[in-house]
Structure formats: C-alpha cells, structure tokens
Amino acid sequence: MTILPSTTPRKARHVKRKQWALVAAATVLPLVASTGTAVADTPSPAPSAACTYTPAVPADNFKGIPAFDPEEAAEPYSATLRTNQGRITFEALTDKAPCTTFSFRFLAENDYFDGTHCHRLTTQRIYVLQCGDPTGTGSGGPGYSFPDENLTGATYPAGTVAMANAGPNTNGSQFFFVWKDTKLSPAYTPFGRVTAGLDVLQKIAAGGEDDQNGPGDGYPTLPVDIRHVKISDR
C-alpha cells in the first residue's frame, strides 16, 4: 500500500477534512521526498491480461459491478465533467485501457460521480488534482477493483487522466488529472487525455491548497464540485 511520508497536518477546518487528512494515504499517489526520490517508487508489475471486476470494500454509493463487454469497451467516447470551476473534457483511451475506460463509463452513466468533489491537489514535485471518491476522504471506492493497464512506458504529461490506487491492481473509482508535466513511476493506469479544460485545471492549481498532507499537498483552496459527468460517443 502506498504510504505518504510522515507529516503533521494543519488543524482541520471541519470534521470531514480532518478525517481525509488522516486517511488520504490509503488510496492516493506517492509523494516525493525532499531528496527528490519517490516514496515507495518500486518497479511496476505486469498488468493482468484479463479484465475482471472483483468485489472489494469499501462500497461507497454502490452502483453494482460492471460486466465487461469487449465490443462495448472498444467504442470510443469522451467524458465532460461539469464542475463549479468550469468544464473539463477528456478523450477516453479505450484502445489502450479498455477495462479502465469501461469502468469509468459505467460509473459515470450511473451518476456515481455526481455531487462529489475533488479532494486532493498537489503543487510541489507532482502536479495532480485527484477526484472520484464519493466520501471525499481519499479512502472511498465503488465496491470493486480491477487490474492495471497501459503501464509499459507510461508517462504523465499535462493533460493526462490516470487512476489512483493503493498498490498493484487495486483500481477503483479514484482518478487524477495531471495539470503540469509530472514525473511518476509507471504505476498508475493512464486512461484519458484532456481535450478541453486544461486551463480550468491550471486555474484550480493556481488557487493553491491548504497543506493538510504536508507542503504542497492538501485540499484545493478553490473547491471543485463535480455536478455531472456526461459521456459522449465519438
């Protein structure tokens, strides 16, 4: 399980954010230590060849478990997140990460992300906005997990959409947007590419965060509420 380095979070402004500061390490990206070496930065295992959605806890806002259909999974689509800060649209990489994109579409079409917020922003060493947890704590999940994909040679330039995880093959509902070119080990399934709204992500990043997990890592100062995710066939 990926673990954040020891930090002393600031006093929480309310109960939910205090809980998030304590448990966020369970399902988030690794921070980079002050030496510049990634924490828990180990070689990635080979991804599983089959797409299997395995029941798992937690099961927050449970919508069921998708039944993978290769033909449906191959159909290209784009997703538009309508947020209070603006719209963000990404092209799903259905040809490279069909298991992941099939899951995201399943959750979006069942309104799983509606009414949630992006709970983590990093502004030092790694540059991501993390979303997809209906509990807003960083520890929530959809009730199932699935294998990693598209990791060979994976890089994370600005505009990448990728899965957050708690270790190999533990993908669920949490994902992140890369708002500035970022160096990460190839351990987080890239499954989308932002086609509109990178300026929205950069505006959110420019607003800063509250350092609850340590310098440059906390809750976004500009709250990011996801009102709806629309899936459009291409």
Image: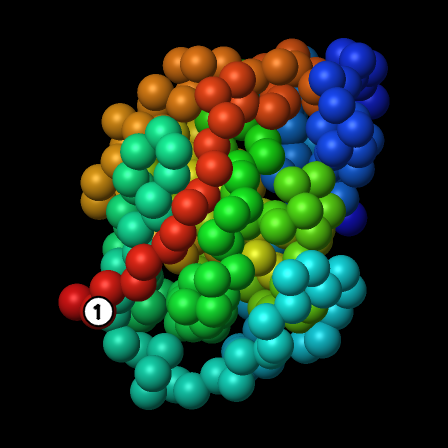
- Find residue 102 and report its image quarter: bottom left
Residue 141 position (above or below residue 85): below
- Name the spot of residue 118 as percent of width and height, x first: 53, 37
- Name the spot of residue 40 as percent of width and height, x first: 72, 38
Q: Is residue 27 visible?
A: no
- Give the residue displayed 76% in from the left and 18% down from the top: 12
Q: Residue furthest left?
A: 234
Q: Amino acid at mark 1?
A: Asp
Q: Quadrant of the C terminus?
A: bottom left
Total marks placed: 1
Name the residue nearer the viewer: 192 or 186.
Answer: 192
- Give the residue displayed 42% in from the left and 87% down from the top: 69
- Find residue 143 and report its image quarter: bottom right
- Name the spot of residue 223 as percent of width and height, x first: 50, 26
- Give the residue displayed 65% in from the left and 28% down from the top: 31
For label 1, the SS is: strand
Label 1, on which residue?
A: 233
Residue 103 position (above or below residue 51): above
Q: Is 41 left or right of 92, judged from the image as shown?
A: right
Q: Is 104 left or right of 64, judged from the image as shown?
A: left
- Find residue 116 and report its image quarter: top right
- Give the residue displayed 27% in from the left and 47% down from the top: 89
Q: Is residue 218 visible?
A: yes
| Crowd rating for badge 1 (residues with CA inside 10 Å; few <14, some 14–19, many 20+) | few
